[in-house]
Amino acid sequence: MRILVLAQPVPDSRAAVKVAPDRSGLETKGLKFVCNPFDEYAIEQAAQLKENRGDVEEIVAIALGGPNALLSLRAALAMGADRAIHVSVEDFPMHDEIASAKAIAAAVEHEDVPFDLILCGKQTIDNDSGELGPALAEFLDLPHAGAVVKFELDDAGSTFSARRRIEGAEEAMEGVLPALVTCEKGLVEPRFPSLPNIMKAKKKPLTTLTLAELSALGDRNPGLTLTELTPPPPRPLCKMIEGDPAEMARELVNLLRTEAKVI
């Protein structure tokens, strides 16, 4: 069995994100990138399958992006992936996850041997979109299970059972491999790579492919065109109300009526 995991780079959620001066996107200079946390659930699930089963031959991590993608791929290798594929792109509409899915699908089809299972996060934390996994499944003509919180393979490695969150309940489902599964928080707890594994990751194979080599987007009609990115308006200053409780309550009601105009 061969497993593919996505390891997309995203800005660190603790970093100060700024819009580029020309408003064409984010200001990436000095911005720290990490592996998408939802993809880390997928990587951990793949690593556990390999540790607990004897039929997982290889885990391959793949990421689309510029040099920042190398950081997330090295993280995936340190967590247990055996090799990595970097789909190197420049001036690519990363906000267009349909285009991203098509490029990744082309890299998957570039492999000599098909994958039995593809695992990825249910969404990325940068644009908070969940299109990439389902779109990739469509381009590869694979069945898809989304937002999975429990995943099991049968002994033969030919079918799977899963549970996914829906509003107010969990939905049980079954499927056959090959398939694509998007992973939700709670599926597994991603490990912190040890220092020896981080060092070993530097020596694991990492292949770089370009879109020119893949001929991935020649017939694609752009789904989304980013014209301008603007930050949200600054929050107004906080107004403190002083006095005894009765006076504060009256003043609050007055401000809600006269300034906020919500009552």
Image: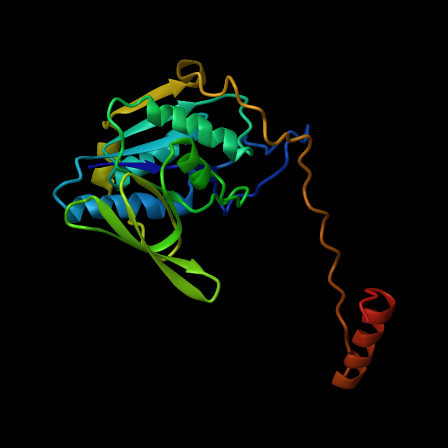
Q: Is residue 173 left or right of residue 262?
A: left
Q: Is residue 240 left or right of residue 102?
A: right
Q: Is residue 233 above or below residue 211?
A: below
Q: Tell me what residue is drawn at x 48 percent, y 30 percent.
A: 100
Rendered location of residue 84, percent (x, y): 30, 29
Q: Nearer the viewer, residue 202 or 111?
A: 111
Q: Nearer the viewer, residue 6 or 31?
A: 6
Q: Tell me what residue is drawn at x 53 percent, y 24 percent.
A: 92
Rendered location of residue 106, percent (x, y): 39, 24
Q: Nearer the viewer, residue 51 or 248?
A: 51
Res 193 seen here:
no
Q: Is residue 117 above or below residue 234?
A: above
Q: Tell me what residue is drawn at x 41 percent, y 28 percent.
A: 104
Which image quarter holds the C terminus? Answer: bottom right
Q: Quadrant of residue 76?
A: top left
Rendered location of residue 183, percent (x, y): 37, 49
Rendered location of residue 83, percent (x, y): 26, 30
Direction left: furthest residue: 54
Q: Is residue 171 above or below residue 17?
A: below
Q: How many marks?
A: 0
Res 9 seen here:
yes
Which image quarter holds the N terminus? Answer: top left
The type of colouring in the image is: rainbow
Q: Tell me what residue is drawn at x 72 percent, y 49 percent.
A: 234
Q: Is residue 50 left or right of residue 68?
A: left
